[in-house]
Every structure is written in structure tokens, then in C-alpha cells.
Amino acid sequence: MKPGYMYCVCLSWMSTFLIYCTSVAILPTVGATLWPGATNIHTTPSDHSIIVLDNVITEPAAHALHSYVLQFAQWKLNGHAQETSTLINNQTAEQSCLLQKKVPWSAQLSSPFYENVCFLKNILSLPELVNFTPHSVQAEILRRGDSIKVQCGLDKQGLDTEYSWRVFLTPDWQINDYGDLMFYDRNDKGGKQEAVLTVHPRMGRFVLWDSSLSFVYHPPSMGYIQGLLSITGQLTSSKNKMKFQDEITDEQQTSRPQFSSQFTRTDEMEDLADKYVRSFYDSEGRVIAVYDNIFSAADLEELQQALLAQGEIMYLPHDVQPEEDVDNAQWIKSFDPEKFATSAVWRRLSQVMRHVSGNRTSWYPYDVALNIVRSADHTRIHQDCEEWEDEYTMVLYLNPDWRPEFCGETVFFEAMPGSELQRQLYGLHGGTEYQPIASVLPKYGRLAVFQGIIPHSARPPSNLFAGARYTFAVKVSLTRRIALAKRLQEVLEDCFEELSMEEEQLLEDLISGVYNHEPSFRSDEWLEQRLQDTKSEASKVRNNKKHQMESSLLTCE
């Protein structure tokens, strides 16, 4: 994974965000039998309606929403941190409903946004919905292998009327990609829940239903490697409920703490020989060292909780290109290397670096991130640096009670030329074959330290583990000067659509390592200032693009 992605999200999207809100004729109520232009209208045995509309949101608007949500939403993982899969036999629909599980990945959207976005304003202009207000609006990404149970319908006895809705935002969806919404209602015989309607995803499709209905949201097929993106929410006539939900959502939107530097109780560590487990080496003598219990149990727990609570998770769609230099870790939470370099955690890890590297003390972090991998993810073999670079990567494993059957090892490889037959048999790209040379089990608190040029891959956990495999990864350069140059290179590569001639030359020099060697015609102070200026400009570009997208999405004709 190019580390620059952990600072900013690539700012490319469709050039046109024209939103066309179609005029609405006088339409029947939600419970009626005719909706002009409706793809499907279904009335359940208990006289509840499910309406499927394919003309509420235009294709440009759907693509604009897709880009906006993926780039700017604040994602979180819901309730899947330390779960193991279990099979429940002889379970009734009611019991299953009580054990409902949320879609793992969600992002709350702010009330100023969803109250003004065109497609919702269009829906709420219908005569029977003018007194309704949206609330609890969030984006969701459903992945292959996700375990989703039936979502219980609301018991509305004595409560205000409420509707649920979902708009699908995944382009090029195929019929065999699954991802259906399956609705349930009680039948006339014994009052048991039965499936009454299946709705297939389609880009821009809007589904509206009575919230008293139960449903299950099927994950994509195992053949679909991307995520199924949608936006979902409620419509309520209760002003109190709307206000309460908005307060919760807006508080979540503004809660974004930064990396904390105070974790470990002591800075100095006893003899590292007691923590050392073993080392592996490739054919060039490059090392992979393994340590246990670098941090105390209390420190580990505090570090784990802080990393999970702080920062922002970024989603990177699966890279379908065949190149072998991308790890395809799709969920990443990044932290500021400069702040991290002042922390007690780094002081502890720098002692390990000195131990691994033959007492060299100039190491400096340039990329600090929490990587999140789940069982159906498809990670790749990759290298963290170029052949000529002197770098190390440190990986701290953060899942308690890990068992061998959960898999999730970090596997290391020896790269060698592949034959034509091997390329045909194994689909090798670039003519490279990889032979495993080491494997590190992700034991809680274990630290793997290795030279970044060694090919490696973070294996996903097995399907016996329904949660996420968490690793805290720190990539280090030999000096702070080199770390500054690496970070500047990554910002230039990943955060701008176009570069000036001067910036292109600077990037070329950074890639070739001109700024890594001293003396240089540019000082460390110049590099640091240029990095700050470039980050500031990238932030302005990102904010301007966000404002432009919001303006387009909220401007209705």
C-alpha cells in the first residue's frame, strides 16, 4: 500500500455532478397500489407496502453520492472486534431477529447534508410524506462473507408512523452478485414470518418500506471483491425523535481525537534478550525478527483502545490491477508520524530498532497506521520500499486470545524469476515467483520487525473469526531527513490530480533519492517546511473539492 493514502484520499471523481430532481406528480399514499414510474409496488399480507423506485435519483447524482461518501464519510466498524463464528441450530425467526447484527461498516451522515440532499427532498415532497423528517441516515458497506441476521421490524403500537429506506450506490452491479434486500411478514397460518419480496441492488435504486417489516440484507457473492455501498435511513413524523437522533449524529461527526502520546508506564525496558523469540533470514541475509511482550498487558490494552477510538478509518476499494506492489489492505487508520515520534510508544519501539539493526539509533517513523483486515478481504504480497532503500517495518499484533485456527499470519517470501509455465499455471504478473520463507502468528502483543524490501503479505483471518485482525504498523527510515522526503513524495503522488513543472521535478528527485543523501542543496528545514506547505495545500484542495461536491449534491433544479 502506498503510505500516502494514509494521509489523504485520492481526489479523482466524475467531472460532472449535475443533479436533476424530477418533478413529482400527485402520487398516492405509501399504502396505495399505484406509484407513477414505480418499478415495483408490493403490499404484504399485513397490508404494509414496499415501494421500489428507479427514477428518484439520476445516474450522475448516484455516481456523485458514491464518490462523496467513499471519500469524505467517517467510517467505523460496528460490533465485530472480537467475534468468533457460531452456528445456532433450531432457531426461530423471532429468536434470530433478537440476535440481529448491524452491517459491519457504517458512516453517519450529518443532518445538514441529508436534510438538503436532492433525492431525499424529492421523496419528502410527496403529499403523504410532507410531514416526515429523515433521521438516522448513514452510509453502509456490505462485504462478501459478512454475517447479517434478520433486522427486526419496529413494534409501532402507540408510536408514530415510521418508514425505512435504502438507496443503492454501487455501479455495474450484476444479477449474480447477490446483495438482495429480503423482506419478511407474518403469514395467515400461525403468524410465522415468511419471505414476501426480494429487491435486487441497482445503481440509484431507492427502496421505501414500512418500518414494522423485518428484513435481511444479503451480502454480495463471494465472487464480488468490492463492497456493496448504500445509504439508508428512517423517515419519522416524530419531531422529538428526529431532534434526538440529530444530536447523536452531529456529536459523532465532530468527535475526532488525535493520536495520544502517553501510553507506556516506563520509557526504558529491561534486557530485550528476554523479549526476543527468533529471527528468520532471506537469501540476502535480511532479517525478520520476532519479539513478545514488548509492552505490558496494561499498556497493550490502553494502546489498543486508544488506536480503535482515535483517528479516522479510510476505505480503499479493492485494487483490481495486477501489479505486485499494492497490499490491498482496504481499511486503514493513519496517524501523524511527527506526533508519534514524541510518544512513549515510539521510544519503546526505537529500542527494539536499535536491537535489530546493530545499535543504529537514527531511525525515524514516516508512516504510522492501524490496519484492519477481515476474513473475506483479499490482501496481496508486496514490498514496503525500493531495493536501494534502507528501511524497516514494525508490526504489532493487537487481537487478544488469538488462536492458530484463526490464521491471519504475516507470511514472508523470497522473490525469484518465474518461468513461462509458472506464469501460466499460477497467474504470475511481472514474471516473479514467490516462495514462503517465514510465517509469524499474530499473537497478542507480538512484534514483528523486518526489512521493508522483503516481500510479505498480511493474511486475512479464517471464517472462524468474524471480527477484524488489527495490526499497528510503523514504517521507519534511516534518518528523519529521509522520512521527511518520503512523506513529501507520498503527498505529491497521492493528493493532487495535477502537478506544476516544478512539482514534477521535485517528485522525480524525491523518487530517485536525491534528497536522501547529505550534503544536499536543500536543508532539512527546507524539506520540513515544504512538507508542511504541501500538506496544507493538499488539505485546501480536498476541502474545496468536498465543498464543490456538496454544493452540487445539494443544488436541486
Image (cartoon, helix red, strand yellow):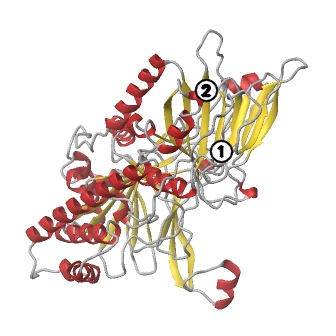
Q: Is residue 183 left or right of residue 435?
A: right
**Residue sitting at x 53%, y 20%:** 237
For mark 1, what is the residue? 464
Q: Badge 2, how many Cα within 10 Å: few under 14, some, many 20+?
A: some
Instruction: Kindly tell me whether residue 458 is visible in this rendering.
Output: yes
What x and y, as percent, mark residue 447? 39, 54
**Residue sitting at x 70%, y 26%:** 97
Image quarter of residue 100: top right
**Vertical side of 50 occupied by 15: above or below:** below
What x and y, as percent, mark residue 507? 26, 78
- Please tell me which residue lies in front, 28 or 157: 28
Q: Badge 1, how many Cα within 10 Å: few under 14, some, many 20+?
A: some
**Vertical side of 528 occupied by 516: above or below:** below
What x and y, as percent, mark residue 354? 24, 62
Image quarter of residue 154: top right
Q: Which comes sooner in the sequence, label 2 or label 1?
A: 2
Q: Amino acid at mark 1?
A: Leu
Q: Amino acid at mark 2?
A: Glu
Q: Residue furthest top?
A: 158
- Please tell me which residue lies in front, 237 or 520: 237
Helix, strand, or loop for circle 1?
loop
For mark 2, what is the residue? 128
- Please tell me which residue lies in front, 495 or 359: 495
